[in-house]
Amino acid sequence: MPELPEVETVRRRLLTCLPGLLLREVVVNDWTVGVQTEQELNDYLAGRRVTGLRRRGKYLLVDFGPLEGPQAGSEGPDAGGYAGPSVAVVHLRMTGQLIFRPQPGARPARFEWRLEPATTLFFQDVRRFGRLWAFEPAAEDGFFGSRRMGPEPFGPEFTPAYLRGALQDRRAPLKAFLLDQRHIAGVGNIYADEALFRARLHPLRSAAPARGHHRDPAGRHRPRGLEHRELHRSRGAAWQLPGDPERLPAHRGALPDLRHDRRAGRRRRSRHALLPALPAAPRRHGGRLPPPARRDQPSAFGQGGRLGGAGPVSGAARRPSGR
C-alpha cells in the first residue's frame, strides 16, 4: 500500500526525468480510472509541458504549463476554451505504478501519457484502485477541501500543539485516529504501526491523552500519549533510504520476546513486562490488519515474528475454555 514515503519516493524519481517533457496525448485504456472522459483529460493536459511535481498526502500532483503549439488558440468543448496551466492528480492507491518500461507480459496500462521526445509513461495498476483527475490550478483547493485532509506531517501546521489538540477528547482507538486522513494527511497502516511501536503505545488504546506518567521498558518515567517526534521518525526513516523505499528501520527488544532459547532450554522474556497479554489472532485497527513483523521485530499480535501467532503460546492459552 503506497503511503506518504512511497509517494514521495515516486515524486522524487519522476522529478529527475519528467519536467520539461511535452504531453502529446492521454490514452485511457480503463474508463474506471477516473470520472472524466478521455477527451476531457486531453482538453486539460494534452499540448502542455510538465513544469513540476508535488505531493499532497498520498496524492501525486503533476503541474503543467499553458497550452503550446497550434492548439493554443483553439477552444476545447469540455475545458471551455481554457488554454492556461493545469494540474493532474494521480492516486496510486494499493498497486499503482508510474513506469516507462512495463514488464514483458504485464497487463495493459490503465492510462498512458505519450510524451515528447518520443516516450510513454504507463500507469500500471493490478488491483485497479488508482485514480486520475485533471483540472485548473484554481480548482485545487476545492478538490482537496472536499476530502477534508489534515495537515502534512512535515508541514509547518503539524506541531505538537496541533497534535495535542486533535487528540483531546478522542475516544477512538489510537491507530484508527492516525489512519483518519482528516487529522493527518498521508498516514497509512505500516507507518501508523511504526509510530506506535516507537512510542510504546498499544494501537487499541484510546486516542485521548491520559494524564500522568508511565514507565518505559528501561524503567524511566515518561509522559503518556503519542509523541509528535515519533510520527516524524517513522516516516523520515523510510525515504532516507534511496532505492529501497520498502525498507523499514529495525527495532529490537521493545515488545515481549517469547522466542524459545534453546541454549537455556526455556523461554526468555524481555525486560518489557508492562504490556498485557495480547491475543494470538490478528485484530483489525481502523479497518486494516497489522503488517507481518520482521524476524528482528516480534509481532504484537502473535509470537514467533509472524502474523497470526505461529510461535509458542502460554499454558493458559492452550487450556480449553470452561475448564
Image (tube, rainbow, N blue to C red):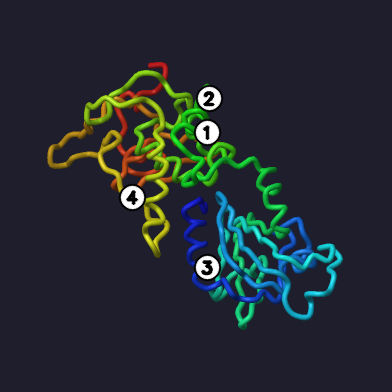
Disc 4 packing (10 Å; few <14; some 14–19; many ≥20) = few
Residue type at tag 3: Leu
Foreground disc of the pair 3, 1: 3
Q: Counting residues from the N terminus, which is met first, the one under dot 4 or under dot 1? A: 1
* Tag 3 secondary structure: helix
Residue type at tag 2: Arg
* Tag 4 secondary structure: loop
Image position, residue 235 (x, y; %): 42, 48
Q: Counting residues from the N terminus, which is met first, the one under dot 4 or under dot 3? A: 3
Residue type at tag 4: Pro
* Tag 1 secondary structure: helix
Q: Residue beneath label 1, please?
A: 177
Disc 1 packing (10 Å; few <14; some 14–19; many ≥20) = many
Q: Name the side, left or right, on which 300 lies relative to 14.
A: left
Considering only vertical position in the picture, is 83 above or below 136? Answer: below
Do tag 2 and tag 1 residues touch (Cβ < 8 Å)? Answer: yes
Image position, residue 63 (x, y; %): 63, 63
Disc 3 packing (10 Å; few <14; some 14–19; many ≥20) = some
**Marks 3/2: CA–CA distance:** 39 Å
Foreground disc of the pair 4, 3: 3
Q: Residue beneath label 2, please?
A: 170
Q: Residue beneath label 3, please?
A: 14
Residue type at tag 1: Phe
